[in-house]
Image: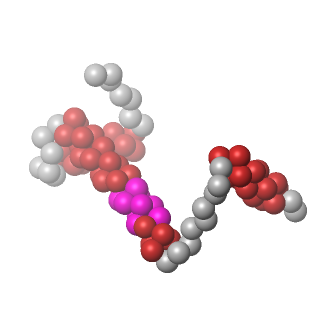
Amino acid sequence: MPNIQLNKRDEKFVEKQISSGLYDSAEEVVTAGLRLLRERDEADLRMLIQEGVDDVEAGRVHTYESAEEFLADLQRAENDAQKP
């Protein structure tokens, strides 16, 4: 496991968490932070998945006959987005 360097502000925060008794070590503080980041990422993914499910259920979908048709549509959308 690599060592990490913290700036003074983060170092003080970690020390405060340890001195409060919530955590026994800097490693525990970092682990808790990483867990929160994972949970946030997973919540974001769940939200995006639900948006997709909602779109399908509401009929907001488009069917393509071929990959070429799909790619052409993507290119049109990209060109439209670049117009002023």
Q: Position of residue 67 (x, y in %)?
A: 65, 46
The dominant secondary structure in magenta is: helix
Q: Residue at x 45, y 61 (%)?
A: 48
Specify whether 76 is left or right of 6.
right
The span picked out in magenta is 43-52
Q: In this rendering, is residue 29 above or below 36? A: above
Q: Residue at x 33, y 39 (%)?
A: 11
The magenta stretch spans residue 44? yes
In this view, the residue in front, 81 or 63, is 63
In this view, the residue in front, 20 or 1, is 1
Residue 81 visible in the snapshot: yes
Specify the quadrant that holds the C terminus: bottom right
Q: Position of residue 62 (x, y in %)?
A: 61, 65
The magenta stretch spans residue 80? no
Q: Residue at x 27, y 40 (%)?
A: 30
Residue at the top extreme, as displayed: 2
Q: In this rendering, is residue 78 above or below 84? A: above
Q: In this rendering, is residue 15 above or below 4? A: below
